[in-house]
Image: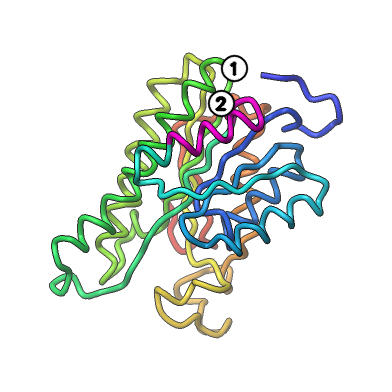
Amino acid sequence: MSTPTSGRPLEGKVALLTGAVRRNGLATAQALARDGAAIVINTRKSVDEGKAAVESIKKLGGMAILAKADITNEKQVKAMFKKAADTFGGIDILINNAADRTRKPFLDHTYAEWQHYAYNVVNAAFLCSREAIPHMLNAGWGSIVNIAGVNAFVGTPECEALCVAKGGLIALTKSLAREFAAKNIRVNAVAPGRIGGSGAQIFGAVPAKGDLAPSIPVGRVGYVEEVAETVRWLCQPSQGFITGMTLHINGGEYMP
């Protein structure tokens, strides 16, 4: 673990974020870059958006590269982490953000669809975490943040596969946190609720502000920047006593 010299708490750290070309992933990448981290942005197929994301970080004065990989493919994951290590020297922070999702009546799912949407998220987090943790062990420090969701806690009709996937991330978070806590590697999760912006419509049309009060006490949907700030905070070296936790960002929609 290198010591920051610029006043930026993540100076000298390297962060890899999966599915980070838009929304929460991109906002988080930019937030970590502002704190000094070098950024590896992963995408499976959105190369043009990925290039734009990299450029947005460079405009902030940060360092970033794009790593195109299917993170459910073991060979491609290994190649992605090798590229990151060859470019920046290692991986200190991993944000497991990518997720395929669909909304479909439960009885209409094929078994192949169930396998894809319910298990690929956890499989990808397994593969990426397995590659990242040796770098963290070598450095003597690391932070993993898994992006879960309120769905895993409240249940969402016609989104059973996503609920299972995000619930699996919560279980993985707790288990990894216990296994690697003594090695100075922290593993936490962030569970966003209703976050506005492009892509939010999968769970239905975004209601007008006045219609939100019964379900979201603060009376609005969240902003991607609010998710990013929470993830950024969890990645700070100063938060060394927080591990195995799930932080909820939902405006009071779900209160554990």
Secondary-structure class at tag 2: strand
Residue 38 position by quadrant: top right
41 and 216: which is toward the camera: 41
Write down the residue under mark 2. 142
59 and 3: which is toward the camera: 59
Place of residue 68 in the rendered image (x, y in percent of width and height, measured from the top left)? 51, 50
Identity of the residue drawn at 58% across and 35% down? 84
Q: Quadrant of the N terminus?
A: top right
Callout 1 amino acid: Ala
What segment is highlighted magenta in the picture? 78-92
Secondary-structure class at tag 1: helix
Seen in the picture, residue 36 relative to 226 is either above or below; the reply is above
For the residues marked 1 and 2, what is the alpha-carbon distance in whole angstroms? 8 Å
Callout 2 amino acid: Gly
Write down the residue under mark 1. 139
Identity of the residue drawn at 51% across and 60% down? 250
In the image, taking residue 106 as reference, residue 39 lies left or right, namely right
- Dominant SS in magenta: helix
Place of residue 255 in the rendered image (x, y in percent of width and height, measured from the top left)? 44, 55
Specify the farthest residue to the right.
6
Q: Indicate yes or no whether the magenta region holds residue 81.
A: yes
Give the colouring mode of the picture. rainbow
Place of residue 22 in the rendered image (x, y in percent of width and height, measured from the top left)? 58, 62
Q: Indicate yes or no whether the magenta region holds residue 35.
A: no
Mark 2 nearby-residue class (10 Å; few <14, some 14–19, many ≥20)? many
Mark 1 vs mark 2, foreground winner is 1
Seen in the picture, residue 54 relative to 143 is either above or below; the reply is below
Identity of the residue drawn at 59% across and 45% down? 231
In the image, taking residue 102 as reference, residue 228 lies left or right, namely right
